[in-house]
Image (tube, rainbow, N blue to C red):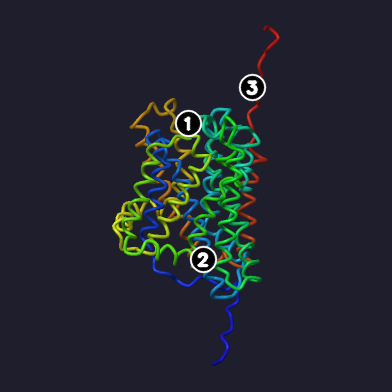
Amino acid sequence: MSEVQPVPATRFAGPRKPHLPALDGLRGVAILGVLLFHTGHLPGGFLGVDLFFALSGYLITDLLLREIETTGAVSPAAFWGRRVRRLLPALVTVLTGVTVLVWAVGPPDLVRTTLDDGPWVQLNLVNWHLLAESAGYWDRFGSQRVFEHLWSIAVEEQFYLLWPPVLLVIARYARRVAGRVAVVAATASIGSLALMVALAGAADPSRVYTGTDTRAFSLLLGAVVATGPVRAALARAAGRWAGAVAALLAVGIGILWSLADGTTSRWLFTGGLFAHSLAAALLIGLCVQAPRTRVAGVLAWPPLRWFGLISYGLYLWHWPVFVLLSPERTGLDGLPRTLAVFAVSIGLATLSKYLVEDPIRFRARWARGRIGVLAFAAVMAGPAVLWVVLPAPAPVVVDITGL
């Protein structure tokens, strides 16, 4: 037999796997949970972010491992190029559009925080910026910040930056790559949990909730389940009871979402978030291993899948819409305001998918290669100009001379 030459890593597009509708449905569940939380209808809906993290860790690691299997290596540059084409267009659209709108019609406090936060959003460091500003996560919803929800996008982007080089090193020096990846991811996830527990004593849990180091376990547990050895072990353990196990995991996650509260549920930060992320990762693995189970069938329900398909744009847009459609500005509150926020956010997310995300991700040849690098630089320059040319309102001066 002739020796098969490995395909250069830079040409890897990923061997196509059967599309799994249940994973789209899981994205839909995650985004609906977040929206219901932010509109005050589901106390534990913020855990949808953890489901997003576990899904991202699983899918990205699965893709990178298939690249290693096909080419024998990982091309971080090619991976980052794919992530840029997938994530940056919609993010820049929201960042630019919301900034200009807020500057034009927003109150001074909102304009100041938007111009202050925007550059850090662009650098994918807004979670650390908010922590440095002592902007508490749990007590700031409804305050004057339109980009605060993007802390989770920053965490994911930082993971995307660091994880491919780790797998590249493992692929270069390890014989059993998937097994070594599982060990590294599991060990790192335990370290992340230990750090969260060690830092969880503060009155405000924002540091451990939005810090990349203390939230990495959610992504890493998804990565663990994406490896071949763990998937095989999960299939053997669940066996013919995969449907029942998936149902138990789904019910347990639902109970957590209905009961958890970020300000009073201190157990979340001493192992609860880790347990939830592990349950989410196992549910993802079972949906992949046993796509014909009842749970996978429910998750493949077309409306849930639809929300999953627009989930990225919906996540980007929903919080600025919520802030800007305030009761003071619209005269709406309670359920009417929630319905208005849902309608406007879904409309903007749909436009984002079909007019911005999909065309650039799938059809824009100029977004690849050397021209793509130039386009990336031009796109990044656009918002950067805003931070320079848009004047921030003068801070409020308090006269204390008469006190």
Seen at 44% across and 47% down, the residue is 314
Q: Nearer the viewer's eye, disc 3 or disc 1?
A: 1
Q: Secondary structure at mark 3?
A: loop
Packing grade of label 3 (10 A; few <14, some 14-19, many >=20) is few
Packing grade of label 1 (10 A; few <14, some 14-19, many >=20) is few
Distance from label 2 to label 1 (Cα)?
38 Å
Q: Position of residue 288 (x, y in %)?
A: 40, 63
Q: Position of residue 194 (x, y in %)?
A: 59, 45
Asked whether 385 or 165 is in front, the reply is 165
Q: Quadrant of the N terminus?
A: bottom right
Q: Nearer the viewer's eye, disc 2 or disc 1?
A: 1
Distance from label 3 to label 2 (Cα)?
51 Å
Q: Amino acid at mark 3?
A: Val
Q: Which residue is mark 3?
A: 396
Can you name the residue that lies furthest to the front here?
237
Q: Amino acid at mark 1?
A: Thr
Q: Amino acid at mark 2?
A: Leu
Residue 264: image tag? 1
Position of 347 with respect to 75 (left or right) is left
- Of labels 3 and 1, earlier in sequence is 1
Q: Secondary structure at mark 1?
A: loop
Asked whether 106 or 300 is in front, the reply is 300
Q: Which residue is mark 2?
A: 63
Q: Quadrant of the C terminus?
A: top right
